[in-house]
């Protein structure tokens, strides 16, 4: 089942599109502002319908933020379309424009065409966004504000473990067992040093607040 993200601050529009697309057999995720739209891209949509005018980040800003990490087609929804808007949208990485008010059948046909075309050429990456930190689990990379962090395999593995279980606390022993293995030589004291180095690398971009310490218990990833 193909997945579609619908992002629009008009709740009646979102409701209409969600009902229509679900009847067409799509799995639909929704967002009502730019920040929610960025967060919902972690669900790996096959296509994004993105309203141009949204609070907390407009459609162009959202598109620019996720474009390098999300390969799926992005279609802008807009009440007006002028050459300047087109230029800005395509420059941000958009693939098409849908002018409001629109025909649902035409929209459905264009969505289907974009998804067919995209799935002939690309495979979706497994990506999560946490503020300005982006984890690409397919490529095993972590980037902050478009800069890829230089991480060791163990440092990446710690971030992968914590981000895939965001909010869950892991003590040093559990992290060590999951990443180094039960039979590894050494002990869990190395975890504190790895966490210190990770904080320093994230801190260069002001993103170290994601890596939280729960005193006396362990560490967790904070969204």
Image (cartoon, grey):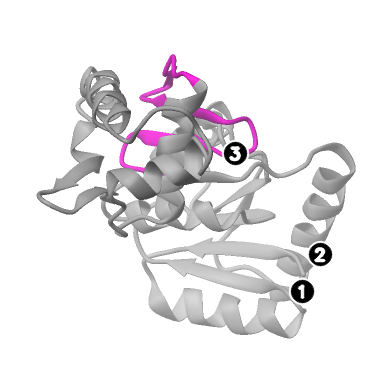
Q: Position of residue 45 (x, y in %)?
A: 63, 56
Residue at the right extreme, as displayed: 120
Q: Is 219 placed above or below 9 here?
A: above
Displayed quadrant of residue 196:
top left
Q: Residues within 10 Å of mark 1 (few under 14, many from 20)?
A: few
* Residue carrying label 1: 105
* Residue carrying label 2: 109
**Is 3 displayed left or right of 187 in the figure?**
right
Q: Is 207 placed above or below 173 here?
A: above
- The reply to whether dot 2 and dot 1 touch (C-beta < 8 Å) is yes
* Residue carrying label 3: 94
Which span of residues is magenta-colored?
A: 129-152
3D distance between C-alphas at marks 3 and 1? 21 Å
3D distance between C-alphas at marks 2 and 3? 18 Å
**Is 137 displayed left or right of 200 in the figure?**
right
Displayed quadrant of residue 1:
bottom right
């Amino acid at each position: 089942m193909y997945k579609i993200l619908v992002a629009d601050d008009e709740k009646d529009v979102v409701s209409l599109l969600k009902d229509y697309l679900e009847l067409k057999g799509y799995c639909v995720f929704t967002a009502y502002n730019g920040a929610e739209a960025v967060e919902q891209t972690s669900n790996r949509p096959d296509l994004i319908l993105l309203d141009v005018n949204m609070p907390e980040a407009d459609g162009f800003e959202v598109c620019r933020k996720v474009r390098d990490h999300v390969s799926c087609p992005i279609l802008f929804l807009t009440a007006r379309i002028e050459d300047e808007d087109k230029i800005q949208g395509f420059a941000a990485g958009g693939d098409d424009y849908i002018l409001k008010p629109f025909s649902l059948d035409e929209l459905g046909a264009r969505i289907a065409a974009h998804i067919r075309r995209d799935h002939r050429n690309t495979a979706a990456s497994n990506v999560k966004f946490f503020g300005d930190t982006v984890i690409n689990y397919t490529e095993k990379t972590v980037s902050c504000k478009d800069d890829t962090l230089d991480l060791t395999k163990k440092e990446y593995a710690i971030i992968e473990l914590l981000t895939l279980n965001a909010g869950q606390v892991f003590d040093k022993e559990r992290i060590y067992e999951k990443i180094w293995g039960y039979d590894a030589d050494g002990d869990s004291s190395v975890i504190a040093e790895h966490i210190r180095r990770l904080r320093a690398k994230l801190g260069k971009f002001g993103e170290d607040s994601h890596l939280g310490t729960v005193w006396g218990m362990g560490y967790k990833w904070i969204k």
